[in-house]
Amino acid sequence: MLNVNNNASVLKQEILVRIAKLQLEGNLVEGVHYIPKTMIPKNSPSIRCCIYHDREILRTRVIARLGISVEDIDDDKQLSDYGKEALEREKPTWPMLTFLNEACNGCVKTKYLPTNACQACLARPCKMNCPRQAIEIYDHRAHIDPAKCINCGLCMQNCPYHAIVKIPIPCEEACPVGAITRNKETGHEQIDYDKCIFCGKCMSSCPFGAVMDKSQLVDVIKHIMNGKKVVAMYAPAIGAQFKGAKVGQLESALLAAGFSRVWEVAIGADITADKEAAEFVERMERGDKMMTTSCCPAYVRAVQIHAPELKNCISETKSPMIYTAELAKKADPDCITVFIGPCLAKKREGFDSDIVDYVLSVEEVSALLAAKEIDITKMEAKPGKYNPTVSARNFAKTGGVAESVKIRLKDDSILRPVVINGLDKAGVKNLQNYGKINAGTVPAPADCPNLIEVMACEGGCIAGPSVIMNPKTGAALLNIYANAGSKELVDGIPPKCDMDEVIKNEK
């Protein structure tokens, strides 16, 4: 995963801010056409062959930020036409991702390359350990024959000078389920959506920003400007994305941005934790081997497609986003619900939901606040009347869901938890192994876990593909945010969250 502080992220964010400003000014259709030229004026240094090619790539980025797939765009249509199309759209369109072929670098096949650091040493461990005799030493350095190399990496592992480097295809390397492959005809990468779990790792790892999520910001701003009751529901991870902000200031900022009400999704996390703990006890009493958490939609989709033997172990409890949306709709049936999170997979979950109308990333919300010149740190703190538990807010970090279940058990000695911290290729194989244990095709070890928490992102939601804060900093901020005004435990167990009581208090 690339550091969030990179030029591709800055560029994508600037496009969002410009689109939001134009829309708020009522000038989106007329003004969007000029974004490429104003962002890349004459005499700008070019990234590709020339600024005209750079502008063309920027044009496709603008189309993606308008919420439109770029794979089949019409070259004869103007950006203003796409701006009009975005404003007339009634709901988000499939899929959540779009691939910019023009931006894709068409990376070379993954390979290992000896560098000038090679000392042509006497030991020659690279050559001695190569299983295909693909390495020869001449001209005072190692050379690898690509026709013989099988990319096993033993040469790199054995070089004492670290003189052999691996040159990967970042998106293929990052995808845990092999959903990205090179199109042999075009030379560019392509996504197989029948395999994709929408973890967003390809999006956050591509150095050229060729994989983009389709923004829903235009849709949300349209409803706000039309005077609709648009409700914001922000995930616990979002509370840790704005440095210097105190609990309650984000609520004020979102209200100032035009949302009619703000719900903290940690409320839904309390409901999820209560129900998941009760479900775990019920499953263990009936003799189930294991239960897995259900909060991460990327993980749930990974099981459904790539580890089906584990499907019946997924908790039937709904995610915090869904419970919060139920609260919002119960409080105001006519409202438009907007989930705000750091996650691409939530856009897929929202797409499949009848009660979540839109899903915005923290990138999109940050752009909206910037367009309206709202500084969160200067807002009056207006936290909601319901104060979530520490464990609910800690859903955003790895281990938080399992811990929330544990502290709600009257007898936690029955619990044998394990946490899968990030879904990479090894993590998916781990899931498949648990599936075999569940199916009985592999004997269960004596210490086999009975509660499995899975987070697709290493570190948890605070390291999601759309975060704007470095995950390490986000983790520190989450700790401060989670412990701010936390609920007291009753006999060591958090009080249950009652939906009717929450709605009554919020009113």
Image: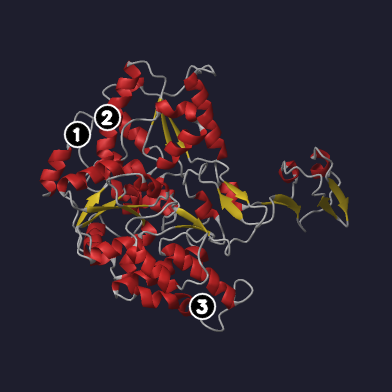
Q: Nearer the viewer, residue 250 or 83?
A: 83
Outermost residue on the bottom side: it is 42
Callout 1 secondary element: loop
Location of residue 412 (image quadrant): top left
Disc 2 marks a residue whose amino acid type is Arg
Residue 438 in percent (x, y) is at: 47, 21
Instruction: Indicate which disc residue 40 carries.
Output: 3
Q: Nearer the viewer, residue 245 or 226?
A: 226
Residue at horizontal 46 percent and vertical 73 percent from the top: 78
Residue 130 in percent (x, y) is at: 80, 40
Disc 1 marks a residue whose amino acid type is Pro
Callout 2 secondary element: loop
Marks 3 and 1, the one that precedes in the sequence: 3
**Disc 3 to disc 1, C-alpha distance:** 56 Å
Residue at horizontal 11 percent and vertical 46 percent from the top: 505
Residue 225 in percent (x, y) is at: 24, 67
Instruction: Indicate which disc residue 495 carries.
Output: 1
Location of residue 227 (image quadrant): bottom left
Instruction: Indicate which disc residue 408 carries.
Output: 2
**Disc 2 to disc 1, C-alpha distance:** 9 Å
Residue 378 in percent (x, y) is at: 25, 67
So how many labels did they put on this image? 3
Label 3 neighbour load within 10 Å: few <14, some 14-19, many 20+: some
Residue at horizontal 39 percent and vertical 72 percent from the top: 18
